[in-house]
Amino acid sequence: MKLDYWYFENFFNSDQIKKINHFIDNNFYGLEKEELNATDTQQNKIKYASVKLINWEKIKHLTNELDQKLYNVNQENFGYDIYPINNNDVCNLNIYSSKMGSKYGWHIDQSENDIFDIKFTVLINLSFEIYKGGEFKLFNGNEYEVKEINKPGNVIMFKSFLNHSVLPITEGERRTLAIFIKGPRFK
């Protein structure tokens, strides 16, 4: 059976979620620039969220050795050739707010680098409370919702080349930390 994604339920508790958010809020090095926001093929903006940027080196001590678990999942279930997460790799704290009508249209996560591809995207739900809307969808022949990421503290790991989207937030705030796992170019 081929898997599109893997998940860890209750990987982080509410105290850990607060600690990670507080740390990122006080240590991020910048916001994603407007001109770097994702666009569709006609250059229309598709991402409406605030994004705080932080290097893996700064937050890895707060992640309960998540990286080792991700490597094990890949080895046992996917078999991709991947690199360890580099200390300088950028992680994105995506903040989707109902006040801003935040959403993220259909897209794939990809590298513009000629040397490596993004093999997996890892999302950690760091929301303080349950929100409404913001459903995460994948498309692999059919569109379907990945409900496991809706709960604060849960983690999903999915194939980055699959189309995915975040529907509009209708109430509250959805916070997810995105980590990108890279590897040699697909051949």
Image: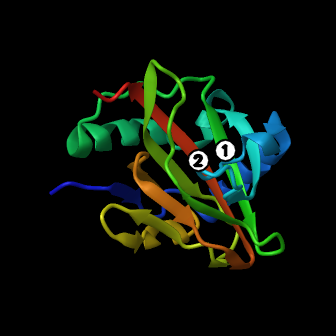
* Image quarter of residue 128: bottom right
What SS does tag 1 mark?
Answer: strand
Q: Residue at x 39, y 27 (%)?
A: 183
What's under tag 1, amino acid-wise? Asn
Q: Which residue is mark 1?
A: 92
Quarter holding the N terminus?
bottom left
* Image quarter of residue 57: top right
How many other residues sit within 10 Å of disc 2, few (<14), some (14-19) or many (≥20)?
many
What SS does tag 2 mark?
Answer: strand
Quarter holding the C terminus?
top left
The alpha-carbon separation of the residues under discs 2 and 1 comes to 5 Å
Front in this rendered view, residue 153 or 162: 162
What's under tag 2, amino acid-wise? Ala
Tell me the tag on residue 178.
2
Position of 113 relative to 148 (above/below): above
Q: Is residue 68 left or right of residue 56?
A: left
